[in-house]
Amino acid sequence: MNFISVLSCLSLLLAAAAAQAPKPCGEDKRLVYKLCMAADGHIMSSGKISYDAFGQRMRVRNFGVVGNETFAMDQIMLTLMYNVYYEIDWSKFSCKKKPLDSSFILMQVPKDAKLMGQVFLGSSSSWGMGVLVNTWGGELPNNATYSAVFTEVGCVPMTLSAYVPSYGWTMIR
């Protein structure tokens, strides 16, 4: 074998290995999943998120405790056509309509995220008995940092953790 053919084989192997590395993901989708949040002991809540990237709308039903007070909140964000936000407080029986001042945020791995690791949750010995997940991390404005765990197949969000120096830790699972 001559030097050129060996070099071309090595370059093909390197290209194949590089193509297998996880890449940030997150195509448009519709999701419904449970929410569990804790923020440095200040707030603990659980609920349900209905997320629609096609219609750019999201509904967050949230029940929790802040200090010694409980709350039941329903937040509806309609971005695409209306740019409006409804906040329904079921514990006070009130509803507030507010303008949305930000664009719709897609639930996806940010393009500038760095891969922190890849693990298999569950069993890899039998098909369908586990899930391959990627942990991504990055920096946010004001010295804040985040890490996010997404499934390799389907790019389903699993966990989001963020640290903001002025507020502390927040975790959404």
Image: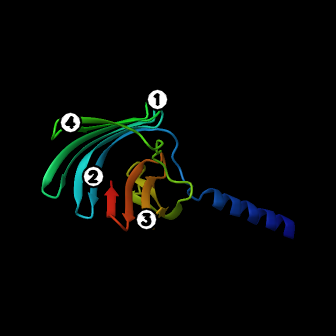
SS for dot 1: loop
Q: Please, what secondary structure does the residue beneath circle 3 have?
A: strand
Q: Earlier in the sequence, mark 1 or mark 3?
A: 1
The residue shown at (46%, 45%) is: 105
- Which is more N-terminal, label 1 or label 2? 2
Eyeballing the image, is 55 above or below 125?
Answer: above
**Label for residue 36?**
2
Please tell me which of labels 2 and 4 falls first in the chain: 2
Q: Residue under label 1, please give it.
A: 81
Kind of residue at badge 3? Ala
Q: Position of residue 116 (x, y in %)?
A: 49, 66
Q: Which residue carries the number 3 mark?
A: 144
Looking at the picture, how far across and down is residue 33, in whole percent? 33, 43
Residue 48's image quarter?
top left
Q: Which quadrant would the N terminus be assigned to in this image? A: bottom right
Do residues under tags 2 and 3 come within 8 Å of each other at their CB atoms?
Answer: no
Camera-near label (2 vs 3) is 3
Q: CA distance from mark 4 to mark 3?
A: 33 Å
For the question of whether residue 39 can be seen, the reply is: yes
Q: CA distance from mark 2 to mark 1?
A: 29 Å
Residue 72, percent from left and from top: 19, 43
Direction bottom: furthest residue = 3
